[in-house]
Image (cartoon, helix red, strand yellow):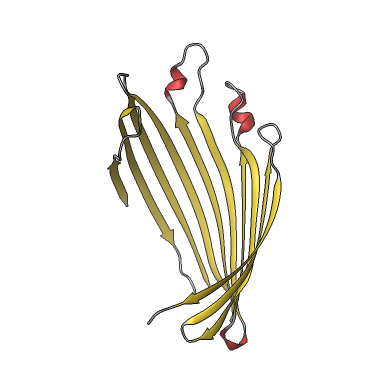
Amino acid sequence: MKRRRILRGPNPVFFDEQNVKTDEFVTRVALRPVLWFQPSFRYQFRKDEYYSRLENQLGMGSQMNSNTYTADLYTRVTQNMLANVSFIRRRARTYTPAAENDTIPIAPFRANWDTWLLGTEYSLPHDVIFQSSMEYSQAKNFDDVSRYTVPMGVDNESLDLNVGFKIPLRKNISLNPNYKFYHFKPSHNVEAGDYNAHAVFVDLDVHWA
């Protein structure tokens, strides 16, 4: 599938023109040898072109190209348990007019990161469902960029954990208590601000017939 679009919104103050053009290509291959084992692979290419012009100034353009590779595996572990495992690799480069600066050229910024996902559902008696998920992301780009020019880049890792229940109260009403844990750890060469966060949520879902 290929999609092409041109977006133009209201111009902010001091801008005479702003345009964004996006080209995107996505393809997916899925295998279903058996019901309990269904792997798939998806590739996505995206190119975003930005053009802006300040008042009484020449227009300037920038561009970002990205390649995203996703591998998924859906499996039924047991009769009552479903699991989905995913690995996502993103590779992107951003080009700006600063790359043509003769004094201090700014090299294209590489935004490369990997993400691992794991989600499970387990059916308990009385139609209660136990849900859990994990998302771990890692970016290692600081050293790559600092070799060429000023120290810029992204270098961090994050972890999100979630466990919860879906408890039916009536036919169209369910109670969903959840616990979430967030962890963020950047490289101290880039930034400070490590943190761990805990959160508890209770949602009430009502589906109208």
Rendered view: 99 above or below 24: above
Q: Residue at x 30, y 48 (%)?
A: 3
- Image coordinates of residue 59 in percent, x first then y, are 32, 23
Front residue of 78 and 163: 163
- Image coordinates of residue 94 in percent, x first then y, are 46, 32
Identify the residue at the far top of this view.
Answer: 103
Q: Residue at x 40, y 44 (%)?
A: 45
Q: Residue at x 66, y 35 (%)?
A: 191
Q: Residue at x 36, y 33 (%)?
A: 50
Res 10 quadrant in image: top left
Res 117 quadrant in image: bottom right
Does residue 21 appear left or right of residue 63 in this picture? Answer: left
Rendered view: 204 above or below 103: below
Quadrant showing the C terminus: bottom left
Does residue 37 appear left or right of residue 16 in this picture? Answer: right
- Image coordinates of residue 177 in percent, x first then y, are 61, 72
Front residue of 151 and 178: 178
Front residue of 161 and 140: 161
